[in-house]
Amino acid sequence: MSQWDGKSKGTLLGYKIFIFLIKQFGVRSAYTLLYFVAAYYFVFHPKSFRSVYFYLRNRHGYGTLRSLCYVYKTYYVFGQTIIDKIAISAGLREQFTYEFDGIEVLKESLAKKQGGILISAHVGNFEIAEKFFADIDVDFRINVVTVDQEHTAIKEYLEQVSPNSGTKLIKISEDMSHVFQINEALSNNELICFTGDRYFEGSKTLQAELLGQTADFPAGPFLIASRLQAPLVFVYVMKEKGLHYHLYAREAKDVKRRNVDSYLNAYTKSVESILRRYPLQWFNFFDFWSRDSTK
């Protein structure tokens, strides 16, 4: 099931080592260390290994040996995206290149003066989008809707390294005050960003097929998107070879206002199209699909 515990893997010491390497010897030196880190996760994290292997073997249909190889590569690429995020946030943005595919979609959305809702997924490296958007002639602010359950020591350390983020966090709260913050941001023609592929225990969920098998998705992003007037855009920041990124923005197609299923189905189709192109950048390292419905 696509329920997540809200905590990412990694230690404070590990982050400090990578940041030291990045600052002293460059991004590619940190990539070298990743060969050993990826091997460690490949061998000593059987739970995440099984989840990634299942995704590659059953959702993409790769053979056994290829799936095993791709599990290791998935860990490695995931590590690269973390290093890139740290490097870019620490002021090394100029070492990276990017191309933007669909900037007109965001421009048209903001021109309507209704704000915009962005829904992404845990694929690629969306967290660095702000650093690339800054180079584009579009004036906007991103608000990220989040459940704040990450490791506090790591968060505090990363905030010291990269204190100048222009992204505002809207934390989901039991008193529903986040809904008012979302409405206020949209009224100011700002962008609201959700991830649509993880939920937490006790939260409302919806079901849809992704890559041919049913999975659970958080209801919140799609309920909000279906009830508000704001345009909906799916956005992904995908890693290419070297230090290059490809940013995608896609307008939601065939959605009907107040029909939440149409919004969720448009989302899953969009995520599928990205995963077909970038199969090694699916970074949900847990049991995403219900195994009893395996096809």
Image (tube, rainbow, N blue to C red):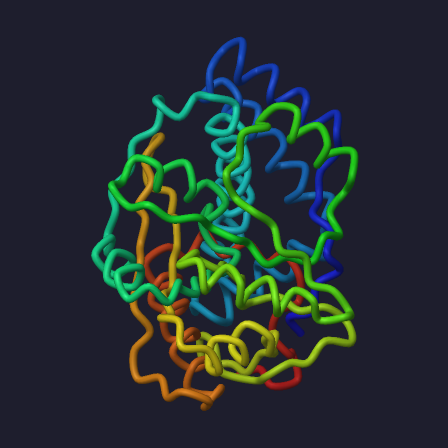
Q: Which picture quadrant has residue 216?
A: bottom right
Q: Is residue 68 above or below residue 115?
A: above
232 displayed left or right of 68:
left
Q: Is residue 253 above or below residue 187?
A: below
The residue sitting at the top extreme is 24
Front residue (pair 223, 271): 223
Front residue (pair 23, 231): 231
Residue at the spot 41% in from the left edge and 36% down from the top edge: 131
Q: Is residue 85 above or below residue 60?
A: above
166 displayed left or right of 6:
left
Q: Is residue 39 above or below residue 235?
A: above
Q: Which picture quadrant has residue 28?
A: top left
Residue 114 spot, x, y in % from top left: 37, 67
208 displayed left or right of 179:
left
Front residue (pair 280, 250): 250
- Image label count: 0
Residue 187 spot, x, y in % from top left: 45, 64
Residue 182 spot, x, y in % from top left: 55, 64
110 displayed left or right of 261:
left
The residue sitting at the left extreme is 104
Residue 198 spot, x, y in % from top left: 62, 66
Residue at the spot 47% in from the left edge and 32% down from the top edge: 84
Q: Quadrant of the N terminus?
A: bottom right
Q: Which picture quadrant has residue 171?
A: bottom right
